[in-house]
Structures are given as structure tokens and as C-alpha cells.
Amino acid sequence: MEKKSREGQDGGPGGGVGGRAGPGRWRGLSLVALLAAFAAGAVVAVPAADSVDRYFSSNRFCATGCHVMEATVSQEYQQSAHWNTKTGVRPKCADCHVSENLTAAMWDHLVGTRELFSFLFKGIRTPEAFEQVRPEGADRVRLAMLGNDSKNCRRCHVMEAIKPEKKRGERQHAEAQEKGITCIACHYNLVHKEVEPSPEFLRRAGME
């Protein structure tokens, strides 16, 4: 009995000196506490991030968040084939311009704050001012879509399932599938006001 008591006091099987927890036990408790804090943070952060994404991805925000968008690209969108569809399917602004994955979507929203910077510091506050930078913006979006193989288009459209009504369209889609031509390479003026593609876009799209 005396030997067992000594083991407990000397940091044997009973734990640390005087029966106190040893360093290993404290490390275990710290890890549990850290995991619990992480889980609690995730429970709060994930729904919050989802709510933020839903708000900033809504047509209401995109179209009416500022006067410039409301007077230009929003009106163009409502006159496009993406708004007036035969099937009644109506993609939102975010379906084309925001990533599907939540983490990537939050990054897109962060990058999108440069529009606020342009509004505050570059004076892009009127439709006339916006038209001056429209080609630059269109080129940036087009090049990004070239770089990701038009992934946002593919969220709704299945290339193999598209059945063009005209023979020319059939030939072009067959060629696109055969050569791996991505959607934006041809459909770069599909929704908004027509903008001439830049030489860089044409080069990367193989359309020179």
C-alpha cells in the first residue's frame, strides 16, 4: 500500500507530482478545448458566411446596389435571352459571375469590392463614366471565363445536350465539342451590351 501511494505522489501511474495532471494530460485537454472552439466557431461562421453570400449574390443587390448597375447592365440583362427564356428558367446574376463553392464565392465577393473602390476613388458613378471602363470590365470577365473553361456556364448548360435549331449552330457546336472550344470563346456578347473583344481575348480563345 505504501508503494502505491508513493507512485501517485512521484508522477507514476496516478499522474503528476502529488496526484496532479502531468504535461501529457494537459496537452490532451488543450487539444480538446481547441477542437471544441473550432467547432463552435464553424457553427457560427458557416451560416453567417452563407447568409452573406446569399445577400451579395442576389439579383436585388446586383441590380439595384448602385445607380450605375441599375441603369446599365441590369436593364441589358432583363432584355436578354437569359431573362426571357422559352423554358422559364432564369439564371441569376450570381449564376454567371459568382463561384458555386461557398469559399470561392466569398473570395469573389471580396474581389468584387474593387467596384466600390472604383465608385469611391475613380469617380465611376454615372452610366457615362461606366461606359468608359466597360471594355476593360468585359475583357476581365471574359478572360477569367476562358481561364476556368466557362465553368459558370456549365452549371446550367450541358454541352452534349444542346440542340441548336439551325444547321450553322449544329456545325459550330459539333466543332466546339471536337476541338474543346469553351463557351465564352463564341458567346462573349450574349447578355450585356455588345463590346468588341480585345486582341488578347481573341488570341487566347484561338479566334485570331
Image (tube, grey):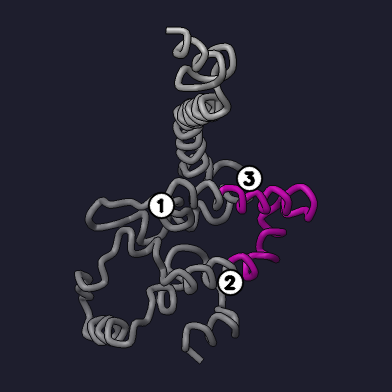
Above or below, comparing residue 84 to residue 164 in the picture:
above
Residue 103, percent across and down? 48, 48
Q: Provide the secondary structure element on which disc 1 rests.
A: loop
Q: Earlier in the sequence, mark 2 or mark 1?
A: 1
Report the front residue among 105 and 11.
Answer: 11
**Disc 2 residue type?**
Asp
Give the amino acid at mark 3: His
Q: Label 1, on which residue?
A: 100
Residue picked out by circle 3? 67
Q: Please tell me whether mark 2 sits on a helix, a strand or a loop.
A: helix
Local crowd size for mark 2, using a 10 Å CA cut-off: few (<14), some (14–19), many (≥20): some
> Residue drawn 78% across and 55% down?
122
Residue that badge 2 annotates: 139
Work out how far the residue at label 3 is from the one at label 2, CA to CA, in angstroms. Answer: 22 Å
Q: Quadrant of the N terminus?
A: top left
Tell me what residue is drawn at x 55 percent, y 42 percent: 64
127 in magenta: yes
Question: In front here: 63 or 72?
Answer: 63
Magenta-colored span = 109-137
Q: Considering only order in the chain, which callout, 3 or 1, is on the residue closer to the N terminus?
A: 3
